[in-house]
Image (tube, rainbow, N blue to C red):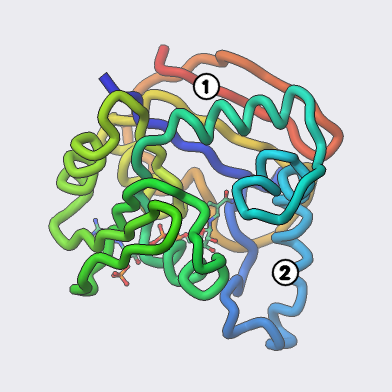
Amino acid sequence: MSKVFVNISLSLDGYMAPEGMTLDNWDNPDYKNWAAKWGALMGWVFNLQQFRDNLKLGPGGDTGPVNDMVKRTTERIGANIMGKRMFEGGERGWPEEAPFHTAVYVLTHEKREPWPRPGGTTFYFVNDGIESALEQARASAGERDIRIAGGANVIQQYLNIGVIDEIEIALAPVFFGGGRRLFENIGDSVPGYQIDNVLHSPLATHLRYIRA
Ligand SMILES: NC(=O)c1ccc[n+]([C@@H]2O[C@H](COP(=O)([O-])OP(=O)(O)OC[C@H]3O[C@@H](n4cnc5c(N)ncnc54)[C@H](OP(=O)(O)O)[C@@H]3O)[C@@H](O)[C@H]2O)c1
């Protein structure tokens, strides 16, 4: 059966996104550091060969164990689930060929028709809850796995119903001091996890947890 996994980057002080991270705040002096903070959080991935391939940025890029890990992760994904806030940022920021190449189930209260993109990504807007999104993702993923892509709100909901088999965190040595915190609103129903693997690189520590 497909695994359900989380795969995200996290600041050292526990945030998935810096305060004020929207394109509307690009020039807002109150949040002028958000793009620099996001860049520091994601810096470990930008020059990987796999990342460059996926976004069609041309040849080159770093190879090695972190690149191999990202390649394996990309290849195992049969469907993605995300929240409306993550989608809103990406709708404006991702290229026309969105970097998922699978069905993507967007949890939202907004009613909207499916949005197919070139390259195999179709966004489906799910209004009837997290279990329904997971059921639809399982049906389309086939033998492959389901990534809960983010953001924090959606990951917390899936953690709390106990369906997440694996949690992969790229812990970047940067401090945000505020923003979207990953681990809050966590209830007692969250299952136990054990460390499965740790991979070091200068820009992030790659932590992998599996169900105990
Ligand atoms: N660091 C990383 O690796 C990483 C990865 C992914 C995302 N992010 C960042 O995380 C941030 C977004 O995270 P977030 O926690 O603010 O928001 P989110 O989880 O992306 O989206 C939350 C929104 O999704 C909708 N939603 C969630 N659950 C729902 C349900 N059960 N039924 C119906 N609608 C539901 C609601 O929007 P509506 O009511 O408006 O429909 C809700 O406000 C972004 O800045 C993104 O870039 C970071």
Picture quarter with ligand 1: bottom left
Residue 87 image point, x, y percent: 42, 64
Q: Please tell me which residue is depicted at 57% across the width and 70% down the height of the picture.
A: 93
Residue 66 image point, x, y percent: 72, 29
Q: Secondary structure at mark 1?
A: strand
- Total label count? 2
| Residue assigned mark 1 | 209
Residue 180, placed above or below residue 69: below
Q: In which quadrant of the rendered view does residue 79 lie?
A: top left
User: Which of the marked residues, 1 or 2, is nearer the chain's N terminus?
Assistant: 2
Left or right? Give the position of 101 relative to 170.
left
Q: Please tell me which residue is depicted at 50% across the width and 61% down the height of the picture.
A: 97
Mark 1: few/some/many CA within 10 Å (<14, 14-19, 20+): some
Query: Depth check: 144 or 199 in front?
Result: 144
**Which numbered marker is on residue 111?**
none
Q: CA distance from mark 1 to mark 2?
A: 29 Å
Residue 72 image point, x, y percent: 56, 26
- As shown in the figure, which amino acid type bears the numbered disc 1? Tyr
Q: Please tell me which residue is depicted at 59% across the width and 35% down the height of the picture.
A: 169
Q: Please tell me which residue is depicted at 60% across the width and 31% down the height of the picture.
A: 71
Q: The N terminus is located in which quarter?
A: top left
Residue 148, placed above or below residue 99: above
Residue reaching furthest to the right: 202
Q: The C terminus is located in which quarter?
A: top left
| Residue assigned mark 2 | 35
Q: Secondary structure at mark 2?
A: helix
Query: Depth check: 198 or 156 in front?
Result: 198
Residue 130 image point, x, y percent: 22, 48
Labels 1 & 2 near each other (Cβ < 8 A): no
- As shown in the figure, which amino acid type bears the numbered disc 2? Ala
Mark 2: few/some/many CA within 10 Å (<14, 14-19, 20+): some
Residue 58, placed above or below residue 178: above
